Image (cartoon, grey):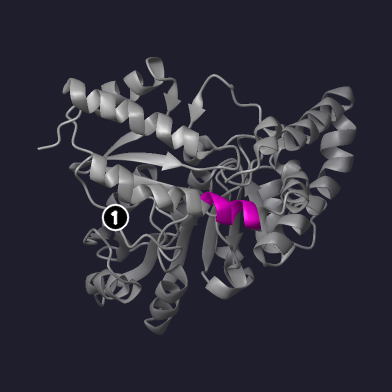
Amino acid sequence: MQSNNLQSQFLLSKNITYLNFGSFGACAKPVFEAYQKFQLELESEPVQFIVINGPEYLKQSRQALGKYINCYEDDVVFVANPSHGINIIVKSFKLNTDDEILTTNLEYGAMDRTWNYYCKKAGAKYIRQQIELPLTSKEKFINDFFKGLTDKTKAIFISHITSATALIFPVKEICARAKEHGLFTIVDGAHVPGHIALDLSDIDADVYTGACHKWMCTPKGCSFLYVKKELQHLFDPLVLSWGYESAVPSHSQFLDYHQTQGTRDFSAFLTVPAAIKFFNEYNWQQVAANCRQLAHSNYQRFCELLHSKPLSPITDEFLGQMCSIPINTNQPEQLQQLLFEKYKIEIPVMKYADKIYLRYSIQSFNTQNDLDILYNALTELIAEGDLINLN
């Protein structure tokens, strides 16, 4: 299925069956080499790198990213992770008493905590609309989501691809309907760049954040925040620094506020062009299609083994290179640890609300053999009857 030569393009241990690309990604070798080159330049001449060369390097990286995700280069700023990006938005978002933020009950836990914190401070409400699983159609999902809409709803916040359940949500349609109601639209696309096609102009969200260090294979700490130009003035940086009332302001207050923040190693931000070059050299559109096919073709098999059901139709509309399998276990942490220590399989076993999910991720270096190793390990554990309950 996958081209074996891509296994040599990653630094991951060859002794581990790595099925957890979705958590923190993994850096491709050529991209990591570009990262080290920038870090060496930084340490060789810090002043020139940070003050003189840095702004142009960042511009070049934003240009490459903007072209890749189809947005204007100055409407994105780099941040360490999507949580950082969303915190910029939520902290400055004007919430009044009894305002409501509409979301789903399937969002990333760190984002739920962020919204809950600021909503509580303002006396607003974070409405986690219940989404019935398994999903059956895009239309039903959209209708179910907007059942949570009231005359107090001020904004919608939604994942493009969920973390625990690994589901693709129809964010373009969600944003379009939200706009009909005059709502502000915020999309968490942490898992999207490099995973499925991303066109920000087409989605037309007011705010979108994504990670490059997951599926785009850049070093850790490389993510972006996109804000529509006419809305950028609404959002202050989390750290006020030299960009505020800058002595040498650029053409963009948005960039000044969020990019000019004193001493930090922003080398990871500069590797986006190298990541895109890597993708182009290996025909990544086909690589990703192969990964999806491998992930999808095994989903039903694992569900049957664990006496569970897929969380959606097994199609590109709902699933990318990750699949989450409901699993009945009272000891998810112990199961994850045992899979790693005994079977050398790196895979998350995640508790979300009252459910447990085993989520596998398929990247260019994975093969059918990797999923067979997982299948055989689970079969053995089921036979032993300690950590997995099929009742």
Quarter holding residue 305: top left
- The answer, for residue 112, to whether it is visible in the render is no
Residue 348 location, x and y as percent? 38, 33
- The answer, for residue 155, to whether it is visible in the render is yes
Label 1 Cα crowd, 10 Å radius (few <14 / some 14-19 / many 20+): many
Q: Residue furthest top?
A: 342
Q: Residue at x 26, y 55 (%)?
A: 105
Under mark 1, the amino acid is Leu
Up the image or down, 317 lies above or below 279; here it is: below
Please tell me which residue lies in front, 217 or 389. 389
Please tell me which residue lies in front, 167 or 290. 290
Instruction: Give the extent of the magenta segment.
Output: 286-291
Q: Residue at x 27, y 76 (%)?
A: 143
Q: Residue furthest bottom?
A: 180
Q: Is residue 288 within the magenta segment?
A: yes
What is the secondary structure assignment of the residue under circle 1? Answer: loop
